[in-house]
Image: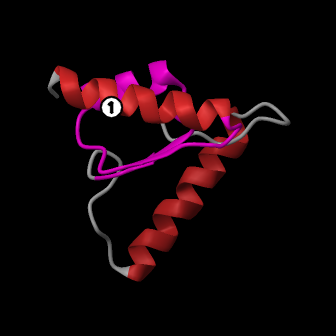
Amino acid sequence: MDIDSAQIIAAIVAMAHSLKLQTFAEGLETHEQMKMLNHLGCHFAQGYLISRRLPEEQFLQFVRDYWAQEQRVSRPGRSARLS
């Protein structure tokens, strides 16, 4: 990712935070992007790094598996985070 893109993303996330909005990144493809988004405090993300496009039944199973794991590792009162 080039420096201009990183600065634009940082500005958008900061602006959302100042407005008390949650952020959702789309198009996440690399661990470098995930690390940067986590550092910036991005709340949610989706993209090929998490999963490729899935048929409906596989998607539903993916979500069920994710939430089952999240319930085992989450502390009460915390939002789920794709990281």
The reply to whether the magenta stretch includes residue 51 is no
Q: Residue under circle 1?
A: 8
**Can residue 76 be seen in this snapshot?**
yes
Q: Residue at x 54, y 26 (%)?
A: 41
The reply to whether the magenta stretch includes residue 31 is yes
User: Label 1 amino acid?
Assistant: Ile
Residue 36 rendering spot, x and y as whole percentages: 36, 23
Label 1 CA crowd tier, 10 Å (few <14, some 14–19, many 20+): few
Which of the pair 32/13 is nearer the observer?
A: 13
Q: Is residue 68 above or below residue 80?
A: below
Residue 48 rendering spot, x and y as whole percentages: 26, 52
**Can residue 31 be seen in this snapshot?**
no
Pick out the residue farthest to the left: 2
Numbered disc 1: secondary structure: helix
Q: Residue at x 62, y 31 (%)?
A: 17
**Apparent side of residue 53 relative to residue 21 in the rendered image (left or right):** left
Q: Residue at x 71, y 40 (%)?
A: 79
Q: Quadrant of residue 22?
A: top right
In magenta, the rendered stretch is 19-47
Q: Is residue 73 above or below residue 46?
A: above
